[in-house]
């Protein structure tokens, strides 16, 4: 990772893999150096699929985020306002998740906005009980 001012940036893409051993698969950066290791337990195919999924998700992150931002900023004037507004709502929720401004409650799987301190507080839909958890998803 490189640090620029107060912002930490991930290793540039594209990421790739694969250096495989019996116990792990290494994900590499464009320079060929390791970024992360995916553990392989009993099933080498599952470990390789996990590594490939991580690589695809990371390599497509910027394009997907840009597409969502375009959708979120569309001007809706063609009579399909309800559909367009819902589409924008979904896009904005996905952008908040990608940018780390929301997290999923581990107790009810509801997506909840994070406050500036990376804490989410909400009422559970079924019980209306108050729950708070960190942005990393640990309930408290």
Image: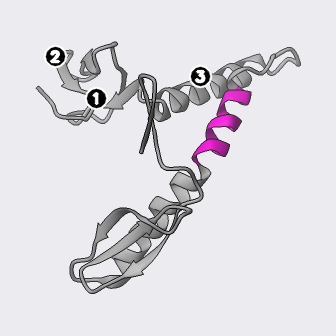
Q: Few, some or many C-alpha atoms within 10 Å of disc 3 (few <14, some 14-19, many ≥20)?
A: some
Please give the name of the residue rendered at 65% of the width and 24% of the height, measured from the top-left corner. Answer: 88
Q: Which of marks 3 and 2 is in front?
A: 3
Q: Tell me: 106 left or right of 70.
A: left
Instruction: Tell me the quarter of the image containing the C terminus.
Output: top left
Which residue is nearer to you in this view: 31 or 117? Answer: 31
From the image, tell me which residue sits under label 1: 135
Distance from the alpha carbon under mark 3 to that under mark 2: 25 Å
Q: Nearer the viewer, mark 3 or mark 1?
A: 1
Q: In this view, does 43 lie above or below 8?
A: below
- Queried whether the magenta region covers residue 66, the answer comes back as yes
Image location (x, y in percent) of residue 17: 48, 72
Q: Are marks 3 and 2 in contact (CB under 8 Å)?
A: no
Q: In this view, does 77 lie above or below 67?
A: above
From the image, tell me which residue sits under label 3: 89
Q: Quadrant of residue 50?
A: bottom left
Could you tell me which secondary element the residue under label 2 belongs to?
loop
Please give the name of the residue rendered at 72% of the width and 29% of the height, measured from the top-left corner. Answer: 71
Looking at the image, is mark 3 or mark 1 earlier in the sequence? 3
From the image, tell me which residue sits under label 2: 129
Q: Few, some or many C-alpha atoms within 10 Å of disc 2 (few <14, some 14-19, many ≥20)?
A: few
């Amino acid at each position: 990772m490189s640090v620029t001012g107060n912002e930490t940036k991930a290793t540039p893409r594209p990421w790739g893999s694969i250096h495989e051993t019996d116990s792990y698969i290494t994900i590499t950066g464009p320079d060929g150096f390791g970024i992360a290791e995916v553990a392989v337990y009993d099933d080498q195919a599952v470990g390789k699929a996990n590594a490939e999924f991580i690589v695809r998700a990371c390599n497509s992150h910027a394009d997907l985020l840009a597409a969502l931002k375009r959708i979120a900023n569309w001007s809706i004037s063609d009579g399909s306002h309800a559909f367009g507004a819902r589409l924008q709502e979904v896009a904005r929720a996905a952008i908040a998740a990608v940018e780390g401004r929301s997290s999923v409650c581990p107790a009810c799987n509801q997506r909840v906005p994070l406050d500036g301190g990376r804490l989410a507080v909400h009422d559970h839909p079924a019980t209306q009980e108050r729950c708070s958890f960190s942005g990393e998803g640990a309930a408290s």
